[in-house]
Amino acid sequence: LSVGVAYGVLRLLAPMVAERFAVVVLPPLMVNAYASYLFSILITAGTMIATSLLLGWETPGELLHQERTGWLRASQLRVSQIDPTGHVSRSPAWPVVLGIALVVVGASLSLVIFW
């Protein structure tokens, strides 16, 4: 996340540096208002994936910290009772229906109402 924040700050400062000191810090495409969103996602996600590949993922079933009381402790206990083999039972189709509805509503708002 720090790399993504660094890119965002650099992207904001790059036009001022180029104007005042005549030094191009980033290519014009990476400073573009619309393309910078894509680069921000790619740089942040790419760095997170590379770090995970380098350092490794947490093993399933292990927690970094276990709470002693409260709702988080109750949730941790419920999660620890899940089958450790990773077998997931089939759930009803309602999550798929809700996901499709969310995409349709989002696209409708973006392309019809807010356009």
Image (cartoon, grey):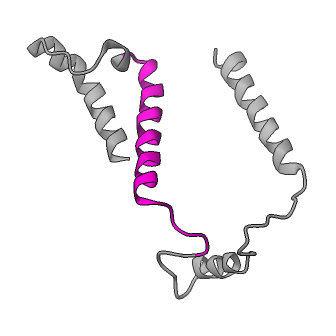
Number of marks in the rendered image: 0
Name the residue: 52% across, 88% down.
68
The secondary structure that dominates the magenta segment is helix
Locate residue 12, reporting x and y percent: 28, 26
Locate residue 103, reporting x and y percent: 74, 33
114 vs 6, nearest the viewer: 6
Using residue 8 as the reference point, say whether residue 66 is left or right of it. right
Residue 37 magenta: yes
78 vs 50, nearest the viewer: 50
11 vs 49, nearest the viewer: 49
Locate residue 86, reporting x and y percent: 73, 67
User: Where is 43 relative to 50, above or below?
Assistant: above
Name the residue: 23% across, 17% down.
15
Give the quarter of the image for residue 27. top left
Using residue 24 as the reference point, say whether residue 63 is left or right of it. right
Query: Furthest residue to the left?
Result: 21
Locate residue 110, reporting x and y percent: 66, 22
Name the residue: 41% across, 23% down.
36
In which quadrant will I find the C terminus? top right
Residue 1 magenta: no
Give the quarter of the image for residue 26. top left
| Magenta segment | 32-61
62 vs 102, nearest the viewer: 62
Name the residue: 22% across, 25% down.
13
